[in-house]
Image (spheres, rainbow, N blue to C red):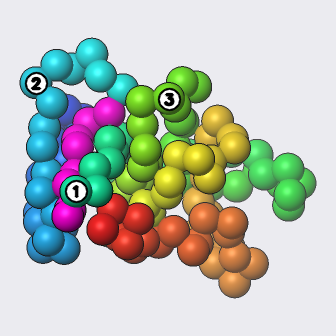
Amino acid sequence: MIANNVKRGKACEYSFVSEAIKKGLTVCLPTDEANDFDFVTIKNKKINKVQLRSVYKMKKSFCKRDNLQSERFCFNLPKDKKDIDVLVLHIEPTNKWYIIPYKDITVGTIAFNPSAKAKGSQYDKYENNWEVLL
């Protein structure tokens, strides 16, 4: 396991690029870090600006739906979405990828509770949803 957060983030970026290339995508990395997006993906003239977020440990959060506090993988999302087409979330311990069109996101935080899989999450349908980028 990588201890340094910067190195952990870079490892996630490289994993994303590797997965995207395997799916036939061209991946471009902007040279200007002031952008809201981390990558641009291209497939057949379809261009997506992608923001990548990763998480490697659970934290306590409150779920209004279940009215309880539990350990979850949480992603805080940016407020301004205008320059991002797709959000890619990676949960490192489970190596799960969630590929979500930004237009489908209506909250500021997305949380995944691996022990509550039976109940389902509104974001389950986005797991390995690479078709969004294709």
User: Front-most of 60 and 117?
Assistant: 117
Left or right: 23 with respect to 109? left
Residue drawn at point x = 62 percent, y = 52 percent:
104
> Which amino acid, by three-letter code, is at mark 1?
Lys
User: Front-most of 129 and 12?
Assistant: 129
Residue drawn at point x = 69 percent, y = 41 percent:
107
**First in sequence: mark 1 vs mark 2:** 2
**First in sequence: mark 1 vs mark 3:** 1
In this figure, which residue is indicated by the disc labeled 2? 31
User: Front-most of 134 and 55?
Assistant: 134
Magenta segment's dominant SS is strand
Count of marks overlaid on the render: 3
In this figure, which residue is indicated by the disc labeled 3? 82
> Which amino acid, by three-letter code, is at mark 2?
Thr
For residue 38: magenta? yes
Residue extent of the magenta highlight: 37-44
Identify the residue at the far front of this view: 45
Identify the residue at the far bottom of this view: 118
- Element on which disc 3 rests: loop
> Which amino acid, by three-letter code, is at mark 3?
Lys
- Element on which disc 1 rests: loop
Q: Give residue 13's position: percent from left, percent from top.
A: 19, 47
Residue drawn at point x = 36 percent, y = 26 percent:
36
Q: Give residue 44's position: percent from left, percent from top.
A: 20, 64
- Foreground mark, 1 or 3? 1
**Pointers 3 and 2 in contact (CB under 8 A)?**
no
